[in-house]
Image (spheres, grey):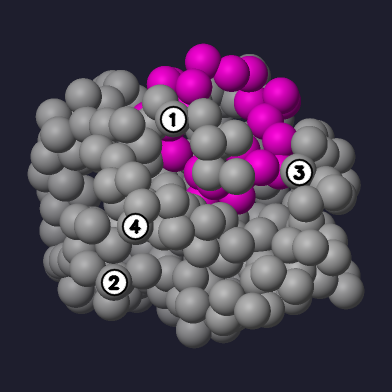
Amino acid sequence: MGIIDTKKWLEDHFYEPTSICENMKASFDGDDSQNIYRYLSGFGMYKPSRRSKQTFEKMKELETWSKIESVYKKYKKKWDGPDVPIYLFPFQMTWRGEENKSGVSFPNLLFLFIGEVTDDKELEALFIHEYHHVCRIHSQKKAIEDYTLLDSIIMEGLAELAVKENCGEVYNASWCHLYDGEKIKQFWDKELKEHLDVKKTEEKHDQLLYGHGRYPRMIGYNTGFHLVNLYYEKKKITEKMQFTIKSEAFL
């Protein structure tokens, strides 16, 4: 497994992304390719356009596939991580403000959506974040539908702690520093601590994690990073312990 040759798929069917998604049906329990594309679009997969075609050409020019492959080999060895298929596609540049990359991870596969990223450390940071999720999911031995809001905020915080340790704080996601400790504490006391057991399948989970509706943007993610850093300053857990430690330890 490892890096899947999505470059070939894109060369053959760039303007037909649903045809590309036909190749991934087995990974999505045979779901319809249109549903798969709609789902991945929600995480930043490209929409066919002149601009996204330029992004694809830039990815080829920068040898993005081989760069991600070498980063994958590095962290698979370092973390003794699972062997999973990794799918690379261009990023939808108008999708999320100033962002130029995104990803989404599952227990057994990984997607990276990449814009015109010229800094290799940025690529590494993106990969670290998503592959860290895969490694933690594998180590926790817990069904995804049983994940709680606490599990999610800690998982996001730990992934960015790994970015900070391996690439430096400058490569942390912008949401890591959106709010100060006082704001986080107020949100924790007023909103979050009563809902830590909310399951991933419940609407409230994403509202609090992403900061939808009346909640501050990315507040759950930001709180997770804050909690994990507080714990790390006191305990100095090793990288491999980050995969096995229970979410409740951070409380």
Disc on the earlier residue, 2 or 1: 2
Q: CA separation, marks 4 and 3?
A: 23 Å
Disc on the earlier residue, 2 or 4: 2
Residue 4 location (% of width, % of height): 30, 34
Q: Nearer the viewer, mark 4 or mark 3?
A: 4
Residue 141 location (% of width, % of height): 51, 15
> Which residue sits furthest bottom?
98
Q: CA separation, marks 2 and 1?
A: 23 Å
Residue 129 location (% of width, % of height): 38, 51
Q: Amino acid at mark 3?
A: Leu
User: Seen in the image, is 36 located left or right of residue 122?
Assistant: right
The residue at the point 36 percent across, 52 percent down is 234
Circle 3 residue: 196
Disc on the earlier residue, 3 or 1: 3
Q: Secondary structure at mark 2?
A: helix
Q: Which residue is nearer to you in this view: 107 or 195?
A: 195
* Residue 90 lies in the magenta-colored region: no
Circle 1 residue: 245
The residue at the point 49 percent across, 84 percent down is 98
Q: CA separation, marks 4 and 1?
A: 16 Å
Circle 4 residue: 233
- In magenta, the rendered stretch is 133-156
Q: Amino acid at mark 2?
A: Glu
Disc on the earlier residue, 2 or 3: 2
